[in-house]
Amino acid sequence: MSKKPRKNYTAQEKVAILRRHLLEHVPLSEVCEQEQLQPTVFYRWQKQFFENGPLTFTAASRPATAPLEKKVSALEQKLARKNEVIAELMEEHLNLKQAFGDL
């Protein structure tokens, strides 16, 4: 008697299987038979799904764009300040050239 190779389900496949039973109301026995899945595996996935569900709605689970946006904003401010300093220096330079004549 040989064992069947174990199928590794993707996260999307697991959610689709859970959805079929929980939202589409397909009987668990039918879902497990079609997917060749043990009910204990289904219930473990369901437990994990509901335990990790709140992470979906937290900022931590969203792409980490906030630190990047903060860094971009800081760099833009630094660049604006640099441009102001350069403009002041250029104005001073032109005033000195005018005061001493074009050397």
Image (cartoon, helix red, strand yellow):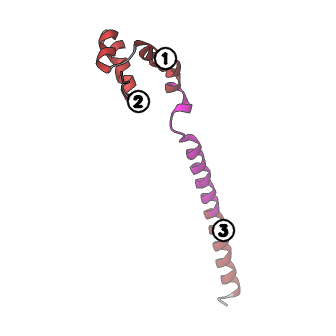
Q: Main secondary structure of the magenta part?
A: helix
Residue 92, x across and y down, in percent: 68, 74
Q: How many marks?
A: 3
At label 2, the amino acid type is Asn
Magenta region: which residues? 57-82
Q: Secondary structure at mark 3?
A: helix
Residue ID for mark 1:
50
2 or 81: nearer the eye? Answer: 2
Is residue 70 covered in magenta? yes
Q: Which residue shows up at 49% across the image and 26% down it?
A: 56
Residue ID for mark 3:
88
* Image position of 19 (left or right of 99): left
Q: Residues within 10 Å of mark 3 (few under 14, many from 20)?
A: few
Distance of label 2 from label 3 (alpha carbons): 65 Å
Tag of residue 8: 2
Residue 61, x across and y down, in percent: 53, 32
In which quadrant will I find the N terminus?
Answer: top left
Q: Which of the two labelled residues, at mark 2 and mark 3, occupies the earlier sequence position?
A: 2
At label 1, the amino acid type is Phe
Q: Which residue shows up at 53% across the image and 42% down it?
A: 65
Q: Secondary structure at mark 1?
A: helix
